[in-house]
């Protein structure tokens, strides 16, 4: 046996224990240890039953994702699980924490499964661009039927142990000590003379149902919802084999389809997104033992949409939070807004009434800064105007206790200037939430020039506590995400002046995988926001940095987007469905004419290049200036805050996949054709000429 898998006998029960921190992933040592341990237990005449348990916080959480893309090592996981199922002695998987992917497949190859009540089980492979490749697509349908198996495998979402028990994935729920529960269940089996119950031999759940119709319906649903994804349809084909082929051939078919997914660029991108999301929370240069301050209570300044959303994040994490507003009426409105927002979740069934009340008990309203004297952190979410920020931070400086963290949610103002409004700039940090703050996972943690290590470490810990994807960034106009999205939006507007329509640009970018096209997004957030930034920039930018004029023309025509029922699209009363705006062609013609542009046909590929390469070029500048600590942090920000498709890996991963030499050459062409904005970032030029990638930095 190996140190990651141990075998010992307790009476007539063989106990196999996996201990491979942090999540008992099925690396080759674990697979080898499992195979050897189950074979030894099989050969031991004294052994009448086998119990499989794991140390640490969780059962096996899957294959070792770090091994993907590397040469396969024996034994393979299918070999191991098929060997477990073939065993002649009843085997019991004792599940706690999560049994995910290969972990659930190992459990399904055991003859019985028991789970701690708070455990979860699932097959999340599709989220990594894969499919369950060790029998999950053949065994799960045999336990829960094709319909539920398709749902679980195509969504990749786990289910609670209680539901797993109702479905028969788990035979019994238990509380308390793992091994005791496993031994008790094993001894019961022995006493009842129960032998192996092989999942692969079951057919009852596959019979009497029009499984072909279920498969067809799922294929249609996937085609509609995620047409660009590679693995979901292959998940369906693998499940289809569970009822069209005998087990052996079904397993073989699964392996073929798994192999197709394994080599797909989307798998590489999704695995990149998985690991880099976790890496982003590691701050380069921050000593490991940096103390983290206790955060037991919070304050939020401003009870608008952002402020209430931020307050809800603290309440969701069980942290009492006070919302400060300028009047009792505004204060009460803010509290009501929180209640109404939670109420929508209750209506959707994603929150219980009890949970709503529990969270509302944690949210209170105040109008006096003196009531913030006891809180550990305050986040201001007031109007984006430096004068207003100054008043807030001077008041916070005067009333908050020493050591309280003073955070600004500013999305573009200079955090260093804000810090200078206080006598404690070392306690000032940026916590840039994304709207709606109680939904969006991204949190840009902005380090000011004076922000202390301890405050930065605590801000990152707050992000984790609030279940955000916290990414540390430096101070500049727009930090990382907004600074890049400005380039992307500007290029999209220029494309309208050159010949494209909003529908075409949005469709091309939706097909690329963006959650929403730039013009539908503009209509949603309101054209006046973009226009305000343009106006500010016109006053500061050198003349060679031309700006599109389409927003000005639309604002002049009173078209500000959804809020006026008309923008790049028109919206019928009470509807958010974008419809073509019949007045737009004339405005586009006028804008093109004013720019002396002959409108021309633009290809989707050209639209993707002009928008994506603008992101990449700005990302390279951000890296060069040290505003982001690594290229993958930029990917994490874009995927989690701007709807960039995880299956493309993020703008910088996407650039590496194209090849920086090609990206650089194209940007040089755009620089010639479209002027100053397209000056190539020196870092991009350097890497391109050296044949290197952003990932090599
Ligand atoms: N392989 C390798 N490392 C993993 C890992 C895995 N499967 N899962 C987590 N880690 C690392 C992670 O990178 C981090 O490392 C640390 O563990 C803690 O993770 C054949 C092919 C289990 C719910 O997709 O969903 O099985 O940053 O911060 O919040 O069919 O990790 O500390 O260095 O996320 O408590 C299928 C992925 C694989 C599960 C725990 N399994 N993991 O969440 O901790 S494919 C998955 C998770 C497969 C088979 C197929 C979560 C978690 P570091 P964490 P957490």
Image (cartoon, rainbow, N blue to C red):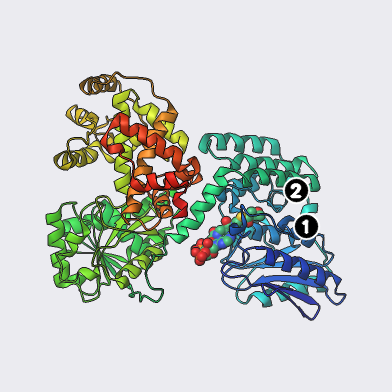
Q: Is residue 517 visible?
A: no
Residue 99: where, in percent of width, then height? Answer: 62, 62
Residue 347: where, in percent of width, then height? Answer: 41, 49
Q: Residue furthest bottom?
A: 11
Q: Quadrant of ligand 1?
A: bottom right
Q: In this view, does 494 lie to the left or right of 329?
A: right
Q: In this view, does 8 lie above or below 567?
A: below
| N-term-proximal mark, 1 vs 2 | 1
Q: Quadrant of the C terminus?
A: bottom left
Can you identify the residue that label 1 sits on? 82
Residue 232: where, in percent of width, then height? Answer: 59, 42
Q: Is mark 1 on a helix, strand or loop?
A: helix
Residue 630: where, in percent of width, then height? Answer: 40, 56
Circles 1 and 2 in contact, beta carbons < 8 Å:
yes
Q: Quadrant of the N terminus?
A: bottom right
Can you identify the residue that label 2 sits on? 251
Q: Can residue 178 be seen in this view?
A: yes
The 10 Å Cα crowd at callout 1, few under 14, some 14 to 19, many 20 or more, is: some
**Residue at left offset 56%, top offset 38%:** 222
Q: Is mark 2 on a helix, strand or loop?
A: helix
């Amino acid at each position: 046996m190996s140190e990651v898998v141990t075998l010992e006998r307790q009476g007539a029960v063989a106990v196999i224990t996996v201990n491979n921190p942090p999540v008992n992933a099925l690396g080759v040592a674990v697979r080898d240890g499992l195979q050897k341990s189950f074979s030894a237990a099989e050969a031991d005449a004294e052994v009448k039953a086998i119990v499989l348990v794991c140390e640490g916080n969780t059962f096996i959480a899957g294959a070792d994702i770090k091994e993907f893309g590397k040469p396969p090592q024996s034994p393979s996981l299918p070999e191991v699980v098929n060997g477990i199922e073939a065993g002649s002695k009843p085997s019991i998987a004792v599940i706690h924490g999560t049994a995910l992917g290969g972990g659930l497949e190992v459990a399904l190859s055991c003859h019985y499964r028991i789970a701690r009540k708070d455990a979860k089980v699932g097959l999340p492979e599709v989220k990594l661009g894969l499919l369950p490749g060790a029998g999950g697509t053949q065994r799960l349908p045999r336990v829960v039927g094709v319909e539920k198996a398709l749902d679980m495998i195509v969504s990749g979402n786990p289910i609670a142990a209680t539901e797993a028990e109702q479905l028969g994935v788990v035979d019994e729920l238990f509380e308390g000590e793992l091994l005791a529960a496993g031994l008790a269940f094993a001894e019961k089996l022995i006493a009842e003379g129960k032998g192996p119950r092989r999942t692969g031999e079951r057919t009852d759940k596959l019979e009497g149902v029009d499984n072909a119709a279920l498969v067809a319906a799922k294929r249609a649903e996937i085609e509609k919802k995620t047409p660009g994804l590679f693995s979901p349809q292959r998940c369906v084909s693998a499940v289809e084999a569970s009822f069209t082929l005998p087990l052996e051939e079904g397993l073989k078919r699964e392996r073929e389809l798994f192999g197709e997914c394994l080599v797909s660029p989307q798998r590489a991108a999704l695995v990149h997104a998985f690991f880099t999301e976790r890496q982003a929370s590691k701050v380069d240069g921050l000593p490991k033992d940096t103390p983290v301050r206790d955060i037991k209570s919070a304050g939020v300044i401003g009870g608008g949409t952002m402020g209430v959303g931020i307050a809800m994040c603290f309440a969701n994490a069980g942290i009492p939070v006070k919302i400060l507003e300028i009047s009792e009426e505004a204060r009460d409105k803010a509290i009501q807004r929180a209640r109404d927002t939670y109420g929508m979740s209750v209506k959707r069934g994603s929150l219980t009434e009890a949970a709503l009340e529990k969270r509302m008990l944690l949210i209170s309203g105040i109008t006096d800064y003196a009531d913030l004297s006891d809180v550990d952190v305050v986040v201001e979410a007031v109007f984006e105007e430096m004068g207003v920020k100054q008043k807030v931070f001077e008041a916070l400086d005067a009333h908050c206790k020493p050591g309280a963290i003073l955070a600004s949610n500013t999305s573009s103002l200079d955090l260093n200037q804000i810090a200078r409004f206080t006598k404690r700039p070392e306690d000032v940090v940026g916590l840039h939430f994304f709207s709606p703050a109680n939904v969006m996972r991204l949190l840009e943690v902005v380090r000011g020039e004076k922000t202390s290590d301890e405050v930065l470490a605590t801000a990152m810990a707050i992000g984790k506590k609030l279940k955000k994807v916290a990414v540390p960034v430096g101070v500049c106009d727009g930090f990382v995400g907004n600074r890049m999205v400005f380039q992307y939006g500007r290029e999209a507007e220029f494309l309208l002046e050159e010949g494209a329509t909003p529908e075409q640009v949005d469709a091309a970018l939706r097909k690329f995988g963006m959650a929403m096209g730039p013009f539908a997004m503009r209509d949603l957030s309101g054209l006046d926001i973009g226009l305000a930034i343009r106006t500010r920039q016109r006053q500061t930018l050198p003349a060679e940095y031309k700006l599109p004029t389409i927003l000005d023309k639309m604002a002049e025509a009173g078209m500000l987007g959804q809020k006026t029922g008309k923008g790049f699209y028109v919206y019928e009363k009470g509807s958010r469905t974008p419809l073509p705006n019949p007045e737009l062609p004339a405005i586009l013609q006028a804008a093109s004419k004013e720019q002396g542009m002959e409108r021309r046909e633009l290809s989707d590929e050209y639209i993707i290049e002009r928008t994506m390469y603008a992101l990449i070029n700005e990302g390279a500048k951000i890296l060069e200036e040290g505003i982001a600590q690594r290229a993958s942090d930029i990917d994490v920000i874009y995927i989690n805050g701007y709807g960039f498709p995880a299956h493309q890996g993020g703008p910088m991963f996407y650039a590496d996949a194209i090849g920086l030499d090609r990206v650089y050459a194209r940007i040089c062409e755009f620089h010639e054709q479209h002027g100053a904005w397209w000056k190539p970032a020196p870092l991009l030029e350097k890497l391109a000429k050296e044949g290197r990638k952003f990932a090599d930095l």
